Image: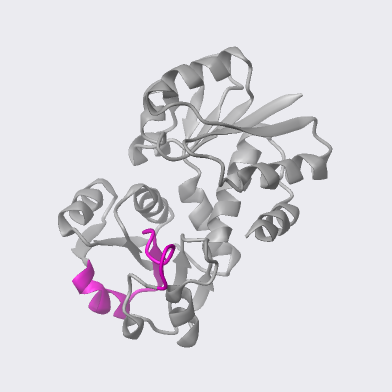
Amino acid sequence: MDVFGLLGNPVGHSLSPPMHETAYDELGLEARYVTFEPEPDDIGAAITGADALEIAGLNVTIPFKQAALEHVEPDELAARIGAVNTIDFSGSGPPTGHNTDAVGALRSLRNHGVTIEGARAVVVGAGGAGRAIAFGLADAGATVTVANRTESKARDLAAAVPDATGRGLEDLEPLLADADVLVNATSVGMEEDASPVPADALHGDLAVLDAVYQPLETRLLRDAAAVGATTVDGAWMLLYQGVEAFELWTGLDAPVEAMNETLRAQL
């Protein structure tokens, strides 16, 4: 039996176990997905132990995404992003590190008919999620502007992303006037009914992805829907980063519909 799992602290809230186990059941795989909660300073020992125990693959979440990078052989994208959220132990060498957050965002948008190549994209937030999404959009052919409360952080991220620019949140209205894609990569909207984007800056030609998935319908998405924009809730990104990890580990096409049904039943 193959064992996959999640490294994080805390992980009790994770929706990944039922989503992945649904995939195993759908495809008749002898596999299980379990959670591991090492102490913050023990990430290296946890990865070494997982390798020794022949764990097949691990997802990585807060607070270990950056620290895990030092204990794996990262692929090119994960190295550029500076964070790992998926580890594969199937090779003969050291475990390999990947970042499926970028692909999760791209597949979420494409699933809703959004064309990314040639798009003008605005990413709100310069943290870990914003960094992954900005790289993913740029690599897919979009022109990216990062907007952040602290403008210097936006500029620092933009300097690392091909042909990107960094601005402050006060510039959102003029930036969005000509934008095709907007991604909220902050936690605004999770704990309160608030949006990081002024409602009057939104328009019907936008595709809006909110990485927040609890609640599914955030203030930003309600405001976007009200002006006729295409809206993509954060559960899609959570789903597709998990789908990408599953396919990386198994080499099989994931049962996306079944995984999505299970995920949304948990929300």
160 to the left or right of 92: left
Q: Is residue 190 visible?
A: yes
- In this view, 84 is above or below 126: above
Q: Position of residue 88 (x, y in %)?
A: 56, 27
Residue 16, image quadrant: top right
| Residue occupying image coordinates x 55% and y 67% | 216
| Residue occupying image coordinates x 74% and y 44% | 23
Q: Quadrant of the N terminus?
A: top right
114 to the left or right of 71: right
242 to the left or right of 169: right
Q: How many labels sit on residues?
A: 0
Work out which residue is located at the far right of the displayed protein and give it.
28
Q: Position of residue 209 (x, y in %)?
A: 47, 66
Q: Position of residue 8 (x, y in %)?
A: 49, 35
205 to the left or right of 36: left
- In this view, 72 is above or below 137: above
| Residue occupying image coordinates x 56% and y 42% | 12
| Residue occupying image coordinates x 35% and y 82% | 199
- In this view, 21 is above or below 171: above
Q: Quadrant of the C terminus?
A: bottom right
Is-magenta flag for residue 183?
Answer: yes
Q: Nearer the viewer, residue 139 or 232?
A: 232
Q: Nearer the viewer, residue 136 or 84?
A: 84
**Colour scheme in use:** one colour
Q: Position of residue 241 (x, y in %)?
A: 55, 48
Q: Is residue 94 visible?
A: no
Q: Nearer the viewer, residue 113 or 157?
A: 157
Write down the region rendered in magenta: 169-193
Is-magenta flag for residue 68?
Answer: no
